[in-house]
Amino acid sequence: MLASNSSSFASSEFIGGVNSPERVLNMHFYMPPDVRSVELMSSGQTDPQIIELLMAELPKYALVPHRVRKQSTGFIFNRIWAAIKRESLLVVAEGVAEPRDVDALFADVFKSETTPFRFMDEVGLDVVLDIENHYCELAGVENKSAPMLEEYIANGWLGVKSGRGFYNDYT
């Protein structure tokens, strides 16, 4: 089996030249590593028995498999997260709010310790920009938050991995 962990590129986009495309799938893990969910998605040519095998085997490793029932650009969670991330970035890029405002509201309303801007800082703002550019390119729309992200990246503010991103309290 060959499984891609890409969150925004379907394995069907890069299986050309693979001798056994029926053995290729997307198997997406999440961060941080204590998140136990794993999404499984066919390449469009994946043998259904491979998905069934993984659905049965992954719980033995304390993982929680979720079947993506149709090939998609982005997984179930990633598509929902993309909308939250896109709008969070836009309200800051447009000057409607600061990252701390968005995160405070999100934490209060959803009773969640994970908030949009802290999560983006964990992922890395360079990765966030690449993913957003990919989604916008596929949708044929402008990435309106790109200039803001590009400015952060130009300043070396990549998030947790550089010690500063939307927040500057990382050591």
Image (cartoon, helix red, strand yellow):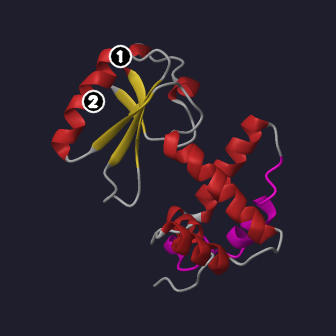
Residue at 53% x, 75% y: name it.
108
Give, as a three-letter code, the residue at label 1. Pro
Quadrant for the C terminus, please.
bottom left
| Mark 1 surroundings: few (<14), some (14-19) or many (≥20) residues within 10 A | few
Lower sequence index among marks 2 and 1: 1
85 vs 72: above or below: below
152 or 113, nearer to the observer? 113
28 or 156, nearer to the observer? 28
Q: Which residue appears farthest toward the left when viewing the image? A: 60
- Numbered tag placed on residue 48 in the rendering: 1
In the drawing, does residue 67 fall left or right of residue 81? left
Residue at 54% x, 46% y: name it.
78
Q: Which residues are magenta?
A: 142-164
Res 33 → quadrant: bottom left
67 vs 128: above or below: above
Mark 2 element type: helix
Q: Are marks 2 and 1 in contact (CB under 8 Å)?
A: no
Residue at 41% x, 52% y: name it.
30
- Numbered tag placed on residue 159 in the rendering: none
86 vs 10: above or below: below
Quick check: is 143 in the magenta stretch?
yes
Give, as a three-letter code, the residue at label 2. Leu
At which x and y percent is residue 141?
Answer: 82, 43
Residue 70 visible in the current orientation? yes
In the drawing, does residue 154 fall left or right of residue 67? right
- Numbered tag placed on residue 54 in the rendering: 2
